[in-house]
Structures are given as structure tokens and as C-alpha cells.
Image (cartoon, rainbow, N blue to C red):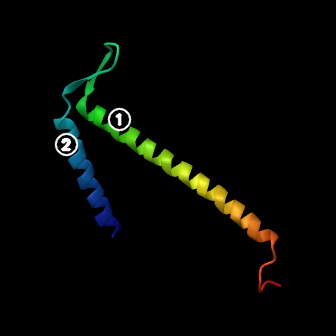
């Protein structure tokens, strides 16, 4: 099973590497105030993907921290009152 997984990872890597090589032409990113940045298309796509993943992870972490805080508060409230069936 591990060999199959590594084979699949290798195929995906080769496919993405081929895509990056085929899309290595320069693109211009134009920002406000007449500033521009020139980079290969594959780098721009990689940066956009990484930025999206970072935003998604940040939103997830914020939600998990909020839920953890709420869970702690609920546990503290329930711990102060004696529970039925405990000795």
C-alpha cells in the first residue's frame, strides 16, 4: 500500500512539474500606482495557492481557538456542580 501511495505521489509530482515547466513564461502583475512585478506564471500560481491555503488555515485556527475556549468554559461550569452518579 505504501508503494502505491509513493507511486501516486510521484505521478502527481511529475505532472505538476511538467505543468510548471510548460507555464514558465513571464507574466506581469500590475499593482496600483503604476508598480509592476514580473515573474514566471508557475511562481505566481504557487504564490496564489500558498496565500489561499494560509488564509484558510488562519480561519480554521481562529475557529478552533474560539471553540476550545467555549469548551473550556462549559467544562468549568459543569465541573463546579456535582454530577449525578459520581462518587
What is the crowding at mark 2: few (fewer than 14 residues within 10 Å), some, or many (at least 20)? few
Q: Nearer the viewer, mark 1 or mark 2?
A: 1
Q: Earlier in the sequence, mark 1 or mark 2?
A: 2
The N terminus is located in which quarter? Answer: bottom left
Q: Vertical placement of 34 versus 86: above or below? A: above
Q: Secondary structure at mark 2?
A: helix
The disc placed on residue 7 is none
Residue under numbered circle 2: 18
Q: Report the residue at 60% width, 53% height from top.
A: 66
Q: Secondary structure at mark 1?
A: helix
Q: Is residue 73 left or right of residue 5?
A: right
Q: Which of the two residues, 24 or 57, is positioned nearer the viewer here?
A: 57
The disc placed on residue 47 is 1
Q: Vertical placement of 62 versus 8: above or below? A: above
Q: Which of the two residues, 53 or 16, is positioned nearer the viewer here?
A: 53
- Residue lying farthest left? 22
- Could you say where residue 33 lies in the image, as x and y percent from the top left? 35, 13
Q: Report the residue at 75% width, 66% height from top.
A: 77
Q: Quadrant of residue 67?
A: bottom right
Q: Which of the two residues, 28 or 15, is positioned nearer the viewer here?
A: 28
Q: Quadrant of residue 76?
A: bottom right
- Could you say where residue 70 lies in the image, as x and y percent from the top left? 65, 58
Q: Is residue 45 left or right of residue 81?
A: left
Q: Is residue 43 left or right of residue 66?
A: left
Q: Quadrant of residue 53?
A: top left
- Could you say where residue 11 lies in the image, as x and y percent from the top left? 23, 54
What is the crowding at mark 1: few (fewer than 14 residues within 10 Å), some, or many (at least 20)? few
The C terminus is located in which quarter? Answer: bottom right
- Could you say where residue 7 lies in the image, as x and y percent from the top left? 27, 60
- Residue lying farthest top? 34
Q: Vertical placement of 45 versus 84: above or below? A: above
Amino acid at each position: 500500500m505504501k508503494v502505491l501511495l509513493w507511486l501516486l505521489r510521484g505521478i502527481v509530482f511529475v505532472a505538476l512539474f511538467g505543468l510548471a515547466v510548460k507555464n514558465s513564461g513571464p507574466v506581469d502583475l500590475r499593482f496600483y500606482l503604476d508598480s509592476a512585478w514580473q515573474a514566471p506564471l508557475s511562481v505566481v500560481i504557487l504564490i496564489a495557492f500558498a496565500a489561499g491555503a494560509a488564509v484558510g488555515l488562519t480561519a480554521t485556527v481562529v475557529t478552533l481557538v474560539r471553540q476550545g475556549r467555549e469548551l473550556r468554559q462549559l467544562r468549568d461550569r459543569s465541573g463546579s456542580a456535582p454530577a449525578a452518579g459520581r462518587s
